[in-house]
Amino acid sequence: MPERSAAEAGERPKVIVVGGGFGGLEVVRGLKHAPVDVILIDQQNYHLFQPLLYQVATAELAPSDVAAPLRKILRGQKNVQVVLARVMGVDLQAKLVRGPRAEARYDYLVLATGATQSYFGHPEYQEFAPGLKTLDDAIEIRRRVLLAFEEAEWEADDASRRAKLTFIVVGGGPTGVELAGAIMETASRSIPKDFRFVDTSTARVILVQGSGRLLKAMPEALGELARRDLEKMGVEVWLNTRVTSAGADGVVIGERRVPAENVLWAAGVHGQPVARALGVELDRAGRVIVGCDMSIPGHPEAFVIGDAAHAIDSRTGEPVPGVAQGAIQTGRFVAEIIRRDLQGVKPQDRPAFSYKDKGSMAAIGRGRAVVSVGKIELGGFLGWLAWGGLHVLFLVGFQTKIFVFLSWVRNYLFADRRVRLITGDPQASVKRPRGATLLGERPSAGEDHGDSPE
Amino acid sequence: MPERSAAEAGERPKVIVVGGGFGGLEVVRGLKHAPVDVILIDQQNYHLFQPLLYQVATAELAPSDVAAPLRKILRGQKNVQVVLARVMGVDLQAKLVRGPRAEARYDYLVLATGATQSYFGHPEYQEFAPGLKTLDDAIEIRRRVLLAFEEAEWEADDASRRAKLTFIVVGGGPTGVELAGAIMETASRSIPKDFRFVDTSTARVILVQGSGRLLKAMPEALGELARRDLEKMGVEVWLNTRVTSAGADGVVIGERRVPAENVLWAAGVHGQPVARALGVELDRAGRVIVGCDMSIPGHPEAFVIGDAAHAIDSRTGEPVPGVAQGAIQTGRFVAEIIRRDLQGVKPQDRPAFSYKDKGSMAAIGRGRAVVSVGKIELGGFLGWLAWGGLHVLFLVGFQTKIFVFLSWVRNYLFADRRVRLITGDPQASVKRPRGATLLGERPSAGEDHGDSPE
């Protein structure tokens, strides 16, 4: 941790930004020409393009296609330093950030630590049902999915083989929808010719959604289109259903008996542990409640943005959604707030944040996506072109854009997923639910974000 | 393990090939039109292009650029099945291969398990000084190298910082030469602008070679050119020197005092453990001693090829070198032997293997390589073009060839290494030697392959 940067920084105010995702990077860039010194702290050395993480998990893209080194991105910005470290705690009174080996004072703090997977109070599910928030999550899911097919190829017991070929994806938001579609496509289109005994196209993919429709943040018609497209691909969509237990003895889904050895969790998000260390009020999902200027009440120099924050759109009174645009816009807003502060604007005169809904989208599989921007709603192939174009536009790095574009063209034309590698030890035991079937309880209707299960 | 393939295979002879590297793949492909059923067993699901592994370790290429899924490579070959498994043992009398869960009978066996890193009787070095034989090795080395720079950036203690910026590469063959050059290039050309406090171009890279020159398998003039080119880049080349100890309290190199936290081992190879399980005669490096038809003495239906074998070139009486061409040629030879066997040729009438030295090469860094083919010796930029062209030619997969080519062009023009990602937990402690310096003993002259250290 930078003891010397206090001295080196000289007289300029110091801004510490924790987290180099969409939100954090936006703050840093927004302060490029401001008379401040910025320190960006992240526990990873790269910026992660989360919207395409599911494609690493399904072996279509490589990790280097969705992650770019932070030092490289910020190379040209002279007033920022990058620190690879995990922030252990924050002292809001003393204006101190604590790392594993040192502390650093700040004049402004921006917490942009994002969200982690939530298991609704059941952390024990995690080893059986990995989530998809980090690059290592994606590599681990890829490993398990590819291993499932390898094991099924040589599994003599019919019931066991069926369980290995059964994939449960929990959560009907964009992540769950995209993951379910991509796994179905892998099994039915990319790899059948790789195997001699098992027919991978008979794999069963079940998408479990607690509420009554998919993609609740999008218009109802598109959620319905997504469901129909998934079902046409062969995915089973179970609405109004919950997983109520995941463990070594099996998976409980609603009232149904389902033997499945592959369970992937895309159902809930929660603020990172560092948010708790702040000692301020959090919402039920562990996010920091902030004012309309994104600052922590009582601490006008400390801000929280993106998925780590519970912020309200001042125009509509609605919460700012935990999506990429939410992080980008709150990040940009806070950079502006800090710049104004430096020019003498008082905290009470700060503007209030208002969110511009730029729409949302989700890919359903090869050549299909649902896109909603303002009043425009697209589906099918046209939606997929828009989806692909927008994602490539936002990717960092020109060579990466080319590589990703080529990978997509190849997969579309030749059904080929380039990155079908099992890294790590394939012989290492994967903790997965084993074959058992259990009756479930009837789930109650309600939100599937932030609520504890019954 | 394939119980049912015995039944499914029907009447045709069964060939079990263990290992999907250069040698194993060559055998499998050579039997494509033979009246046999082939089972290819590998503990990984991919074929690894080892010559470019060092570029994954130095963040220039991604894992998917040097590894291709075996099932995909062999998709079009109807008489082969792929099994992901580790072979635990072989019963040569009963003609059985034993896996973790089942056994399989064979009519022909080809062991192509390659080599693993050798520490000359000091396995305890391994956690401090990783080798470079597998993809996971390369990813781990990449992690350590990138972490070293991150830690050096924020290290206040001068001595500690210097130790973090000191890299020792043990072994002066092609792997060591290429690794040393690539690390020096990374430190001096690719990443200096990423860091604000530490000047990464002051990194120290020391290449330690036990004998009197580098690249002993190549003509002396090229070994000398490699040394000069490396020294021009800033690499220190220590000949006639050995590392005699590597552990938590430091690294001992000859008589010199060197504090270094980064030690990479490219000095020795050893046969895989499965070779020992055969119960036959091995050489000092754990390789199986085979006859001039590559079969195990007394077992004309069991062959060992490539790095796993101690084979003699019948023409020169010299050992077949443990290089890619050695594996490829012995693999091709054994496929031919088996085909002849099936046509009724008796074991005593088999031809003897003779090795065609197709030359060797090593890259020194950006734009320089030494290449020796027959009487032709190339160096410098011309050598690098030849080196690059030959490697791309041998890579598997058209898209991969394009991606690798583009990555090289980009690195050459823009000094950019695309894959500067630290995957796995950066906060996890890396066991590395810490700063201490120790006096060493004067090493005795001798081979640095296969001998135990003093």
Image (tube, coloured by chain):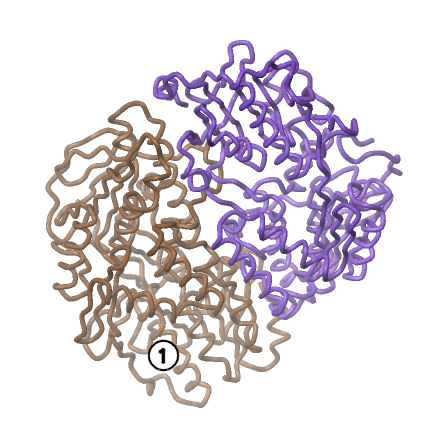
Chain colours: A purple, B brown
- Say few, some or many: other residues with alpha carbon within 10 Å of mark 1 (under 14 / 14 to 19 / 20 or more): many
Image check: B66 left or right of A240? left
Q: Chain of mark 1?
A: B
List the residue tagged with mark 1: B333
- B356 over B72 or under it: above or below: below
Q: In the picture, which quadrant includes the C terminus of chain B?
A: top left
Q: Position of residue B149 (x, y in %)?
A: 35, 36
Extreme bottom residue here?
B344
* Left or right of A181 in this view: B448: left
- In the visual, does A356 lie left or right of B274? right
Q: Residue at x 72, y 48 (%)?
A: A361
Q: Is residue B45 visible?
A: yes
Quarter occupied by the N terminus of chain B: bottom right
- Work out whether residue A5 or residue B85 is closer to the camera in this orientation and state it: A5
Assign a secondary structure to mark 1. helix
* Residue placed most toward the observer, B67 or B353: B67
The three-letter code of the residue at mark 1 reads Phe
Residue A418, percent across and down?
A: 54, 61
Image vertical order of residue A25 relative to residue B112, above or below: above
| Residue B90 appears in the rendering | no
